[in-house]
Image (cartoon, rainbow, N blue to C red):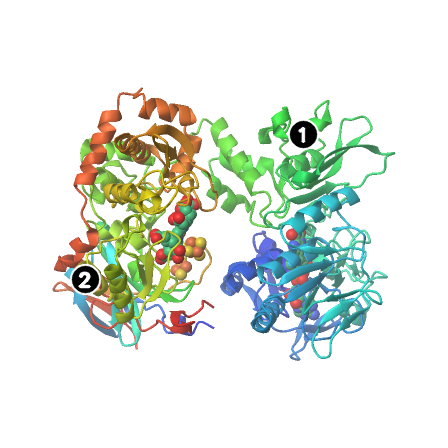
Amino acid sequence: MNILSDKYTTVKPEDVTIWFKAAPVTAFPKDGGACVKYKDLQIAVFNFKRLNTWYACQNLSPEKQEMVLSRGMIGDHKGIPMVACPLHKKIFSLENGENLNGDLEAIATYPVKIENDFVYVGFSE
Amino acid sequence: MKTIIVVGNGMVGYKFCEKFVTKEGSEKFKVIVFGEEPRPAYDRVHLSEFFENQDAKALEMAPAKWYAENNIDLIVDERVTDIHKASKKITTAKDRELSYDYLVLATGSSAFVPPIKGVEKEGVFVYRTIEDLEGMLAYAAKLKQTNPNAKAAVLGGGLLGLEAGKAVMDMGLEPHIVEFAPKLMPRQLDSRSSQVLQLKLESIGLNIHLSKATNQILGDKAITGMEFGEDDVLDVEMLIISAGIRPRDELAKTSGLEMGVRGGIVVDNKMQTSDPNIYAIGEIALYNQMIYGLVAPGYDMAGVAVDQILGENKSVMAEEIDMSTKLKLIGVDVASFGEPFMPAAKGHSIIFENKTQHLYKRINVSLDGKKLLGGILVGDATDYSMLHQIYLNGMAIPEDPAQLILPATEGGGSFGDVMDLPDEAQICSCENVTKGQICGTIESGESKDLADVVSCTKAGTGCGGCKPMVKDLTEATLKSLGIEVKDTVCEHFDLNRQDLYKIIQVKGYKTFDEVLDNHGNGGHGCELCKPVVASLMASINADTANKEYAIQDSNDRFLANIQRNGTYSVVPRVPGGEITPDKLIALGEIAKKYDLYTKVTGGVRIDLFGATLNQLPLIWKDLIGHGFESGHAYGKSLRTVKTCVGSTWCRYGMDESVSFGIELENRYRGIRAPHKIKGGVSGCIRECAEARGKDFGLIAVEGGWNLYLGGNGGATPRHAELFAEQIDNKTVIKYIDRYLMLYMRTAKPLQRTAAWQERLEGGLDYLKEVIIEDKLGIAEDLENEMQTLVNKFECEWTQAINDPEMMKRFNHFVNSEEEDDNLVFVPLREQKMPEKWV
Ligand code: SRM
Ligand SMILES: Cc1cc2nc3c(=O)[nH]c(=O)nc-3n(C[C@H](O)[C@H](O)[C@H](O)COP(=O)(O)OP(=O)(O)OC[C@H]3O[C@@H](n4cnc5c(N)ncnc54)[C@H](O)[C@@H]3O)c2cc1C
Ligand code: SF4
Ligand code: FES
């Protein structure tokens, strides 16, 4: 049924085989996100400045299969870093992708690293 | 390890699993569930909601992964075909053979199809599963293509039949209900209440046919009509049969379990069948010689079976089962509880009827006048929860029981406070949650708000009928503990919007982080508090949404309205609705250039839909080049000031409504408020601008303008109230300045002026004292604050396209110029629209 979401699977830091050089740090808003294209994938990358941490997840909202998550607001829900989908405000943990205010399937998350002011997203192929 | 096989993954089969896994000792069992339907259990009670959004997932009781996480093997799309009692084995339609220690039958029931000639014809449906509904939707859509006025009938005027009737109506077909009995909902209503209900249903467009026995279904291949008598025919092109249910007891028949004469598997109060290793629960179980076609008794049965299997022998099914019900049709209140029809020998009935208002209330009271035995409510069921509780708990009733149902204006209606209920009172009958449990979870500190109560107790997660009561109880308990029920903006602040307004104004904060770090709870903000702070910064400092775009709500972030598929719509301002032909042409040219779907809005301006993120700045460059500016259709800010043509052209016009409308729209444009603001100006009392449906409205009269405040369309429409009469333009502006500013200072987040004004202590009189008489001595401040905002106005789109830094955000990808490759548009008349959501 969800052909689109089948393309996205969580990558654990230890499983990364490719660090994709995405864009300079300055391309991402402070405490907000932007979308990175990698092959035919759309990855939402967030600069969680308040935690000094970067997160990445699929750009696809699992509820309606639209490419929008990078445009959502981020913050925390009971201490868990999260992103809120801009369409219906379903919220997802940035740490493990879990849907925190419903029972949608979890979204895929990806490791991020910063080197020489560049943002890299980790994939495993 | 012992094995439990559950046959049937419906609502009750699922509830068995849910209750089982939370119990101690359950880890010693392996649970395997077979479901014949192609998906995991879903909420059949709310099946009709599928018509609204066709979202099967939204109805799921739990996602497939829940079963795996709880160590349950769920096998869907596979029917169990045989039980071999002696060897304790089952086989399935896919030839799987499995052994069990306990077998739980939860096979539910299917719709009963009476043996009428022709029922097998195309276009005849039953109403039980998601697949049934999908079939109906497809058939109805096909019908409407050839005949937009197609008719459909529902066979059966019971609880379910009426729900199906409403569904037919929502599908856009002409709805007919055909009932064999001389009254509607024969099991729940007496004939007088049925008549009142019939009037009500007819007034919303349902056609009712009572005392009709259907002889045959007409038509060649597909249904074309129903024949009752010789010359009594109803032409319909679709039929939904809702004539009762039949237990799915095939398995019992072939395996020799004891059954009732009219079907169903006989169980005792432990839910055990004639074979002690086999239990039956839900709509398949015949308990007290009854099949209970409701979900609450099924859930209780599931609980009993769980306890019995785990060795808690004392847990048994109650002797008497409450069959009270409430119809869930929007706009039609019907409920019955306890004994709705009562023989005169057992008690007295008190009846209140008002046919013109489609109102009927009946309560049955014991002979000594002390106990409530049952009742019926049609037209207004707001008292249902309370009456039902009084009945269930045998609570004392007022000396004059009529008070329980008299309209509130006559001193009645207010009897009974939720806190008066005994602790054992069952508030949520679906999940079997008592008042004591709800209050207890708050008193113990486990729950701090309504959301906690719901997640800790599960109250309100079944049919949802008890939600208002759960909310009242939660608030009353919190209050009794001295905990203020605070309207804080979210978990990150212990402050409400009004507090934050004052803090930001006094301290002069300029960024979200400053506010959060100094006044937050140590978290990082969320989708609730960020837009509130963004809006406050705008109301106080005249910041545009460009300043800190990552804290803006979905629409403000990109200065456009996000649409279903993640593209945007563009609405330039057309003040007062006045537009030159050249500008109109420019709009058309630009829409054509970017292939945008174009439509005149309900706010009488022009909306261009389907712009991608990358296109937005290009479109705006063109629009601005032609003299347009942002219409703020995306902001919680002024939308339109709708005008009629007024004395400029109209033969009745008393004043120039267009000129004044334009002046007002240009004055308040761009100002951010707790919610959107709309205005209207009509040139005379004929009111063509619908000014009284707006937050502020003006009507020209002899000697000046009448000013109306606090109107609203939307879900809760409200006419604006007359605030001042025959005032001149200058006074109008003075009053609106003061009014809007007061609203911006004190309203809750996302509260329109209508709701704010309604809840304002002192109401309209208070507003007049503050705004006209300046009782608080703040009128000048309010005007000055407003004037500052007016002076600082800047078109945020012009600001954005002139600043390369700000422009960066309008790229779909940070590392590519490409656009979103996920977008699919389909043709619509001569334009296009996004592909439908699945
Ligand atoms: C475009 C338009 C429908 C149309 O095609 O005609 C529209 C579209 C939306 N309306 Fe509306 N409303 C539109 C006129 C109205 C009107 C009619 C009017 O303004 O005279 C009303 C009733 C009057 C009123 O507001 O009191 C109206 C009452 C609502 C409400 C209910 C507000 C309430 O107080 O209950 C909402 C929901 C909300 O804002 O929370 C809403 C929300 C929406 C949203 C913003 C829903 C959303 O969040 O996406 C829709 C945005 C679609 C988009 O991208 O433009 N819309 N909406 C109309 C735009 C008018 C304009 O030129 O700006
Ligand atoms: C439209 C509608 C509205 C309703 N509204 C209300 C309401 O407002 N209030 C209320 O209390 N009740 C309402 N009900 C009734 C309520 O839905 C039922 O009481 C409840 O679903 C019964 O649950 P169950 O698990 O016993 O049966 P079901 O939900 O029917 O589940 C039984 C499941 O077992 C499967 N099955 C059957 N045989 C086999 C087999 N041999 N092998 C494997 N699987 C099998 C079936 O396919 C089905 O999925 C409504 C019902 C409908 C259809
Ligand atoms: S009424 Fe308004 S919000 Fe609802 S669908 Fe129409 S435009 Fe959208
Ligand atoms: S599409 Fe993302 S929450 Fe609805």
Q: Is residue B29 left or right of residue B697?
A: right
Q: Position of residue B761 (x, y in %)?
A: 42, 26
**Which residue occupies 76% across, 71% down?**
B217
Seen as rendered, the residue at the extreme right is B345
- The answer for which chain carries disc 2 is B
> Helix or strand or loop: what does disc 2 sit on?
helix
Which quadrant would the N terminus of chain B be assigned to in this image?
bottom right
Q: Is residue B145 left or right of residue B216?
A: left
Provide the residue designation for mark 2: B621
- Residue drawn at point x = 25 percent, y = 45 percent: B669
How many other residues sit within 10 Å of disc 1, few (<14), some (14-19) or many (≥20)?
A: some
Q: B300 and B545: which one is in front?
A: B545
Q: Amino acid at mark 1?
A: Leu
Compared with A28, B145 (above or below) is: below
Chain ID at mark 1: B
**Residue B305 in view of the camera:** no
- In the image, are marks 2 and 1 on the same chain? yes
Q: Which residue is mark 1?
A: B406
Label at residue B650: none
Q: Nearer the viewer, residue B743 or A58?
A: B743
Give the percent coordinates (x, y) of residue B207.
69, 56
Say which amino acid is labelled 2.
Lys
Compare residues B685 and B176 and report the one nearer the observer.
B685
Residue B814: percent from the left, percent from the top? Answer: 21, 66
